[in-house]
Amino acid sequence: MRESRSGKFKNEMLDDEELMEFIILQLSYQTKEEKQFKIRETVELATKIRDRGQQLFTLAGILAFTDKLIDRETAGRIRRVIEMAQVAQIFEEEKQQALIQAAQDYKEKNRQEMAKVVIRMIQKDYSTEEIVTMVSSYSQDEVEALRKELVKKGNSNQ
């Protein structure tokens, strides 16, 4: 987020230079105490970056650049934020897979139900053209193939 002229924050991505400034800013202070204070302050700000990729890049960069200065508590906080982001990413991927699977299952179930409808229509001597007109998810070739399959089964049952 950047501050606009009106003093309000805008949601914008940080550019590469700004990200690097974010990462190394705290190293510009004189005393170890000032540096540690700024590290904690910068980590707090970095956790508010909305873009996950930029947030993780910034936190990992702070951790890497300040490894000799950073206190254990702040380093631990960075690691927890990174781990939570990774868990959230795994959860999101699993959620997407579950949605894809549910859509495929629904599509297959719907296809099976439509097949039952088409079979009943064939058994009631509807023409292929009539079936295709009423059941748009079936092509003429599919209806004819199903019709032939039913004829074969009918002949084998006699």
Image (cartoon, rainbow, N blue to C red):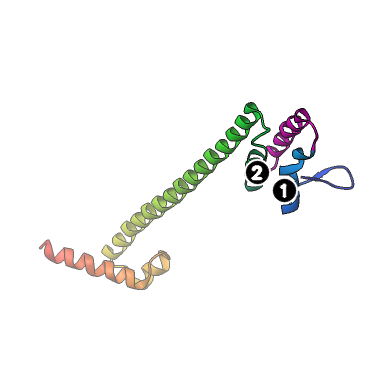
The residue lying at 71 percent from left, 43 percent from top is 23
Q: Position of 70 compared to 82: left or right?
A: right
- Depth order, front residue of 67/125: 67
Disc 2 designates what residue? 61
Disc 1 designates what residue? 20
Q: Is residue 127 visible?
A: no
Query: Does the magenta run of residues contain 32?
Result: yes
Q: Residues within 10 Å of mark 1 (few under 14, many from 20)?
A: some
Residues tagged 2 and 1 counted as in contact (Cβ below 8 A): yes
Q: Position of 7 compared to 105: left or right?
A: right
Q: Which residues are magenta?
A: 29-50
The residue lying at 64 percent from left, 38 percent from top is 63
Query: Does the magenta run of residues contain 140?
Result: no
- Depth order, front residue of 137/126: 137
Question: Which image quarter: residue 39?
Answer: top right
Q: Position of 6 compared to 50: left or right?
A: right
Q: Chief secondary structure of the magenta span?
A: helix
